[in-house]
Image (cartoon, rainbow, N blue to C red):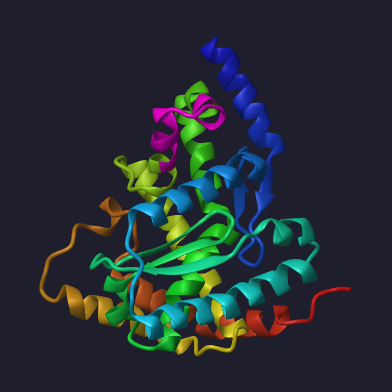
Amino acid sequence: MKKILALVFVATLLVECSTVPITGRKRLNIVGDSQVLPASFAQYKGFLEKNKLSKDVAKSNQIKRVGKKISAAVDRFMRANGMTAEANSYKWEFNLVDDKTVNAWCLPGGKVVFYTGIMPICDNENGVAAVMGHEIAHAFAKHGQERMTSAYGQQLGGIAVALGTRNSKNSQLWNMAYGIGSQVGMLSFSRTHENEADKLGLVFMIMAGYKGEEAAEVWVRMSQRAGSKKSQPEFLSTHPSNKSRIQTLRAYLPEAIRQAAKYNVPAKK
């Protein structure tokens, strides 16, 4: 039975191979939006019910303002490039949660959370835009769905069950897709997503009118925050090193400016 499932899985992958817009990377994805988005929206709603929103009106409004501008740029790109149905599926929402954790994330369908702990690293509105662009890029490139596909390949029927039922496997599924991996192979896969989100996010923030130079500076500040703390080798990390990200973002900036100018066009009517 497992051999049959494996053959079906491989055959499906051959059919479902697609290309990430802008970067051109080939991806494998057998998990559709119709499966993922309802769960994503439910997860987001549940998260907000269990966590405290920030009472800092100015910063909360900043998150919403930046999110609105960058999501509008992404929406404009999608509608100008034959992705109207996909653009319509996004239900954008941006919230600042009162939590000292240095983090931010975006679930499939455009549900974004920033933690107050990351705001000093952002430092300014361009910094917020850099982080916002990066997180939105994860959803745009369907990295979560791609991770689910990879998990499906490793566990076969288990993921299908989790998608189709309301039980503990649902939370396990989301942990696998959006949490931290435990195997070196999966960690490398995650770094591919992080690098791609850095580049896409840089394009999106420039399209929205923000200064792309600030993206690298966010990681300079992240490095300064880390100070002399030793980090594990990059090949054992889910994310590229701070130094690596700074170099990549600075090197990619001219190309990001060119891409932003190319794609920053009115939507087709």
The stretch drawn in magenta includes residue 35: no
Q: Position of residue 44 (x, y in %)?
A: 47, 53
Residues rendered magenta in the picture: 161-174
Q: In the current view of this chain or complex, which residue is farthest to the left?
A: 228
Q: Residue at x 35, y 85 (%)?
A: 217
Q: Residue at x 17, y 73 (%)?
A: 226
Q: Quadrant of residue 163?
A: top right
Q: Is residue 6 left or right of residue 245?
A: right
> In the rendered image, which quarter contains the N terminus?
top right
> In the rendered image, which quarter contains the C terminus?
bottom right
Q: Position of residue 101 (x, y in %)?
A: 25, 65
Q: Is residue 252 left or right of residue 223?
A: right
Q: Is residue 143 left or right of residue 18?
A: left
Q: In the current view of this chain or complex, which residue is farthest to the top?
A: 1
Q: Position of residue 132 (x, y in %)?
A: 47, 73
The secondary structure that dominates the magenta segment is: helix
Q: Residue at x 72, y 66 (%)?
A: 78
Q: Quadrant of residue 34?
A: top right
Task: Please name whichever residue, 17 or 136, is drawn nearer the observer in this view of the structure.
Answer: 136
Q: Position of residue 209 (x, y in %)?
A: 58, 89
Q: How many discs appear?
A: 0
Q: Residue at x 69, y 70 (%)?
A: 75
